[in-house]
């Protein structure tokens, strides 16, 4: 797993980029609508794990809905922003492979914008097993699909990608199944979402 640290100035620049441009704000709103729909029906005050929470945009929206959000991130500067902006029920600094929470605590989980940092199946499966350990409901996961037009038009580093077959294999290796699939813009953007459930 990528262990590259981000310092406070980097996180402040990231925060401005994610909150002051229309494009970024629109992208975040669309991502949240998809992720929220995949979580399904939730009781009032359900406990939702947001990992990695980053600066907390999804934590904030869930909190505004009245959910009890646990925001987890490895970066303390990110967590600081999430705590101030989202005001979740709980903020924890921790690694996705060793989540400092008890078994079956969460009713659902968001794992958004993490898998494109993970190249090896063992890394991805370690994360899925740990998130599954603490989550009794659905896990909404995002990943970058290898086939898309938009990245070809930009001069930027290629992010790690997985196709749906790889995601299914990772899920099945961890006792999970793919329940639903939602691409953001199919084969235009790389970003896809899946809802994972425990196998019965």
Image (tube, grey):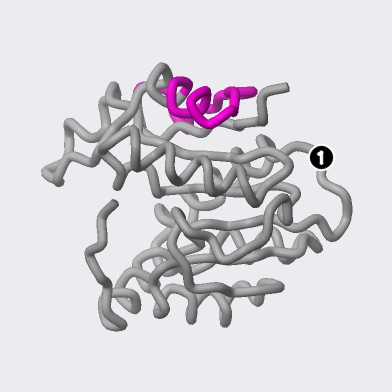
Image side of residue 170 versus residue 44, left or right = left
Residue 70: quadrant of the picture: bottom right
49 and 11: which is toward the camera: 49
Q: Does the magenta portion include 170?
A: yes
Whether residue 147 sits left or right of residue 177 in the image: it is: left
In the depicted structure, whether residue 169 falls above or below residue 127: above
| Residue found at x 68% / y 38% | 138
* Residue at x 34%, y 78% (from the top left corner): 12
Magenta-highlighted residues: 168-187
Q: Is residue 62 magenta?
A: no
The outermost residue toward the right is 44
Q: Residue furthest top?
A: 165
**Image spot of residue 127 (x, y percent):** 45, 46
Residue 190: x and y in percent read 34, 32
What percent of the width, then of the height, locates residue 171?
51, 28
Q: Which residue is mark 1?
A: 41
């Amino acid at each position: 797993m990528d262990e590259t640290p981000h310092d406070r100035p980097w996180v402040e620049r990231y925060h401005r980029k994610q909150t002051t441009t229309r494009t970024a704000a629109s992208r975040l709103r669309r991502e949240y609508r998809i992720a929220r729909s995949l979580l399904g029906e939730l009781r009032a005050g359900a406990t939702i794990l947001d990992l990695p929470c980053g600066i907390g945009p999804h934590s904030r929206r869930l909190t505004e809905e009245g959910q009890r959000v646990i925001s987890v991130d490895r970066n303390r500067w990110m967590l600081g922003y999430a705590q101030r902006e989202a005001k979740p029920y709980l903020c924890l600094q921790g690694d996705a492979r060793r989540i400092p929470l008890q078994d079956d605590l969460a009713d659902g989980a968001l794992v958004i914008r993490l898998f494109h940092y993970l190249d090896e199946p063992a890394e991805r499966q370690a994360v899925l097993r740990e998130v599954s350990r603490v989550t009794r409901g659905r896990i909404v996961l995002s990943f970058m699909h290898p086939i898309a037009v938009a990245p070809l038009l930009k001069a930027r580093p290629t992010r790690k990608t997985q196709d749906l077959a790889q995601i299914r294999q990772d899920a099945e290796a961890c006792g999970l199944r793919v329940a639903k699939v939602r691409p953001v813009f199919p084969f235009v953007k790389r970003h896809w979402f899946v809802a994972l459930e425990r196998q019965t």
